[in-house]
Image (cartoon, rainbow, N blue to C red):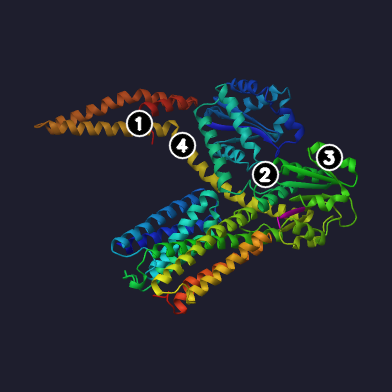
């Protein structure tokens, strides 16, 4: 049953992503509406996916890579839907949904889709706190990344003084910069709490708060990057281009922490 | 029933003629009434703008030619002009061409500046004026409402009206792409000049709330400040004052650059990197080109703005092609509906429906009658046919006669309504 929900959500997500991309070119008012409604359906199907797996005894997140990828993509969909309540800019979807779609396709390619026993060492309520906080933080960083990329494109068009293809579609620099800032100010505390709860949990599970496991190290690197950009924004009045570049670099660190560490390096966090 | 347009526009008539045949708000109603007094005009409305005067009418097909000269006469007579003064500038359109024309006019595809937004409002006003005196009927009502929805589609589905095609509007548009909403932003005007003042005025109309004015002649700055309800500042304080401005419009007669990169670097640092937009309208230029290289600063000179405008004009032309496609498909749909309003298809529909009823009832009855001979059933069938033909004969003849006289509209409408023949 969960595989049905997964396939359906992937299908809706595909349709939504295509429409978000079409929105860059076409002005038909139906396009963003289709995108939005299929994204709602994606959200519902993903919730169905977690619900069915939960009923079969699994946790919605984090027992294997397959689940983690779907959960990350769900966080991203949720974060996007939340942020578009305030920012009515469907064009952000064109830069964020492809990431979500890639995560979902990666999930589909995972050989192990089964439901696993949670390793006894990790059976704890901290799981419910640590994992969602970390993933939600990452999702907001993805939004910051998307708005950063959009900012750089729009800024380049304005500096070059030639309105290019997306000039009319992309929002103003002010909106993009503020979206980027908002995403960081919400994402950063989430990541911080994610790291803190993770280390408390580690103390319970492994008997040490911090062991320089690759995941821990890379989380710290990510944290430092975002701490630096937020600090510069607040004290040195950093904005625009520099902030946009930093949120792109920061998100690459997020991706490495999430995927690279699991796939390339071995440590306590790499289950499979 | 036939659509007929008689009119003249910027494409066929010079301003001297257009201004003579135009209708004002005051005499429009009188004009529509006089138009309707033409013997062969069943429905009519007049669109009158500075670029066009057009009469849209519904006339009997058979009397098309006479209706045409009646309307031309009406235009001349109403404005007390000899017919041959306006005749050479008039154009005539009938049938599908009319539908296309009205859709194109409303969507601003026929305007002098394609995409200009006023025309739709003007057509709407013309329509409500005519509707108020009951000069429009079924066909014009439906067609004009359709024209409004086509215009809306064109506006939302194409970018025909979105990009600025004048320098001062291009400046406003760029400001919006940098700052988003312009509410609460401050603009600084350095020097004076028609185009600079126009740009400042557009910015104020778009939400900019405060204007600072600097001029080498302080009195001039004070005078302009009064006009714009802004603040005049001495020219010597240019740099300190500029720190407060988000948008700077410069248009002085200075032979040398007055704003250079170093100065802007200092200012932007004091502004904690809040973006600035410089618009240089002066020739020779007031602002160093390198100012554009400073981070969070965007500096456009007159040629840059002209370049943006040129790109926008090209975009509009491309978008107009898309708009024409939309209009084309809407015209096809509308003419299909028009055809269904004609007598012949209505007669066919009426026949088909009653025939269906007849057969149904006949079959029901024959099924209940056992032991009936082949001959008797034939006779009953012949009777049903005869009854139907006799009853239908009258409405059908009526419709045919009305069609012949060219005013079948009302009859067809009634028949369609009472027999519920809607598709």
* Relative height, residue A268 to residue A10 (above, below): below
Estimate the spatial distance between the alpha carbons at disc 4 and disc 1, rounded to whole Å: 17 Å
- Label whose residue precedes the other's in the sequence (3 or 2): 2
* Residue B337 numbered tag: 4
Query: Is the residue B202 above or below the residue B125 in the image?
Result: below
Q: Nearer the viewer, residue B368 or A126?
A: A126
Q: Could you say where residue A25 lies in the image, as x and y percent from the top left?
A: 56, 56
Identify residue for label 2.
B183
Q: What stretch of residues is rendered in magenta?
A: B273-278
Q: Earlier in the sequence, mark 3 or mark 1?
A: 3
Q: Give the label, 3 or 1, closer to the camera.
A: 3
On whether residue A93 falls in the magenta region, the answer is no
Crowding at mark 3 (Cα within 10 Å: few <14, some 14-19, many 20+)? many
Judged left or right of residue B377, residue B201 is right
- The span from disc 3 to disc 4 (Cα, nearest Å) is 59 Å
Q: Name the residue located 32 percent from the left edge and 33 percent from the top edge.
A: B353
Residue named by callout 3: B224
Label 4: how many Cα within 10 Å (few below 14, some 14–19, many 20+): some
Q: Is residue B178 above or below residue B224?
A: below
Residue drawn 66% across the image and 64% down it? A242
Q: For the C terminus of chain B, which image quadrant?
A: top left
- Kindly check if marks 2 and 4 are in contact, taking CB atoms under 8 A apart as contact: no
Instruction: Judge the density around disc 1: few (<14), some (14-19), many (≥20) Cα neighbours within 10 Å.
Output: many
Q: Secondary structure at mark 1?
A: helix
Residue B122 visible? The answer is: yes
């Amino acid at each position: 049953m969960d595989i049905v929900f997964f396939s359906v959500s992937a299908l809706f997500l595909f349709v939504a992503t295509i429409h978000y991309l079409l929105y860059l070119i076409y002005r038909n008012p139906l396009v963003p509406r289709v995108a939005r409604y299929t994204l709602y359906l994606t959200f519902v199907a993903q919730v169905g996916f977690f619900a069915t797996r939960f009923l079969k005894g699994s946790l919605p997140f984090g027992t294997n890579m397959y689940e983690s990828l779907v959960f990350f993509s769900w966080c991203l969909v949720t974060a996007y839907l939340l942020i578009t309540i305030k920012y009515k800019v469907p064009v952000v979807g064109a830069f964020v949904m492809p990431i979500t779609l890639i995560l979902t396709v990666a999930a589909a390619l995972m050989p192990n889709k089964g439901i696993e026993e949670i390793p006894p060492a990790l059976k704890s309520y901290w799981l419910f706190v640590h994992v969602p906080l970390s993933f939600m933080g990452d999702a907001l960083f993805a939004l910051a990344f998307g708005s950063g990329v959009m900012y750089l494109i729009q800024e380049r068009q304005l500096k070059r003084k030639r309105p290019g293809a997306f000039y009319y579609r992309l929002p103003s620099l002010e909106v993009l910069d503020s979206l980027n800032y908002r995403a960081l100010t919400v994402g950063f505390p989430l990541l911080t709490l994610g790291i803190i709860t993770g280390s408390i949990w580690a103390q319970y599970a492994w008997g040490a708060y911090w062991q320089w496991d690759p995941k821990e190290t890379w989380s710290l690197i990510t944290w430092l990057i975002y701490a630096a950009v937020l600090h510069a924004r607040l004290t040195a009045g950093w904005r625009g281009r520099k902030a946009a570049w930093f949120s792109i670099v920061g998100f690459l660190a997020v991706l490495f922490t999430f995927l690279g560490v699991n796939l390339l390096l071995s440590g306590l966090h790499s289950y499979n | 029933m036939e659509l007929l347009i008689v009119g003249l526009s910027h494409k066929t008539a010079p301003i001297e003629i257009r201004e003579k045949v135009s209708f004002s708000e005051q005499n429009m109603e009188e004009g529509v009434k006089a138009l309707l007094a033409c013997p062969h005009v069943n429905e009519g409305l007049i669109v009158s703008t500075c670029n066009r005067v057009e009469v849209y009418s519904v006339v009997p097909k058979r009397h098309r030619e006479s209706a045409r000269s009646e309307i031309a006469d009406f235009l001349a007579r109403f404005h007390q002009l000899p017919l041959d003064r306006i005749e050479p500038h008039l154009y005539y359109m009938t049938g599908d061409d009319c539908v296309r024309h009205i859709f194109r006019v409303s969507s601003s595809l026929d305007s002098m500046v394609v995409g200009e937004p006023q025309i739709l409002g003007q057509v709407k006003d013309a329509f409500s004026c005519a509707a108020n005196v009951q000069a429009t009927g079924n066909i014009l009502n439906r067609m004009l409402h359709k024209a409004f929805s086509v215009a809306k589609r064109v506006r939302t589905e194409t970018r025909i009206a979105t990009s600025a095609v004048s320098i001062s509007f291009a400046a406003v548009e760029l400001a919006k792409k940098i700052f988003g909403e312009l509410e609460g932003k401050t603009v600084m005007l350095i020097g004076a000049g028609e185009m600079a003042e126009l740009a400042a005025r557009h910015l104020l109309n778009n939400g900019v709330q405060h204007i600072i004015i600097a001029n080498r002649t302080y009195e001039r700055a004070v005078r302009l400040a009064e006009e714009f309800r802004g603040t005049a500042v001495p020219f010597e304080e240019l740099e300190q004052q500029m720190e407060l401005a988000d948008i700077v419009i410069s248009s002085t007669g200075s032979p040398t650059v007055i704003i250079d990169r170093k100065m802007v670097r200092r200012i932007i640092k004091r502004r904690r990197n809040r973006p600035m937009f410089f618009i240089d309208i002066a020739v020779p230029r007031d602002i160093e080109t390198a100012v554009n290289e400073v981070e969070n600063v965007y500096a456009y000179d007159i040629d840059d703005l002209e370049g943006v405008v040129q790109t926008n004009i090209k975009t509009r032309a491309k978008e107009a092609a898309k708009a024409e496609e939309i209009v084309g498909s809407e015209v096809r749909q509308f003419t299909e509906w028009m055809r269904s309003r004609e007598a012949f298809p209505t007669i066919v529909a009426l026949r088909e429906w009653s025939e269906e009823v007849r057969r149904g009832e006949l079959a029901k009855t024959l099924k209940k009658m056992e032991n009936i001979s082949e001959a008797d059933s034939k006779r009953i069938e012949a009777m049903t046919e005869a009854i139907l033909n006799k009853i239908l004969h009258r409405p059908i003849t009526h419709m045919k006669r009305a069609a012949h006289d060219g005013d079948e509209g009302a009859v067809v409408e009634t028949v369609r309504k009472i027999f519920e023949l809607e598709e």
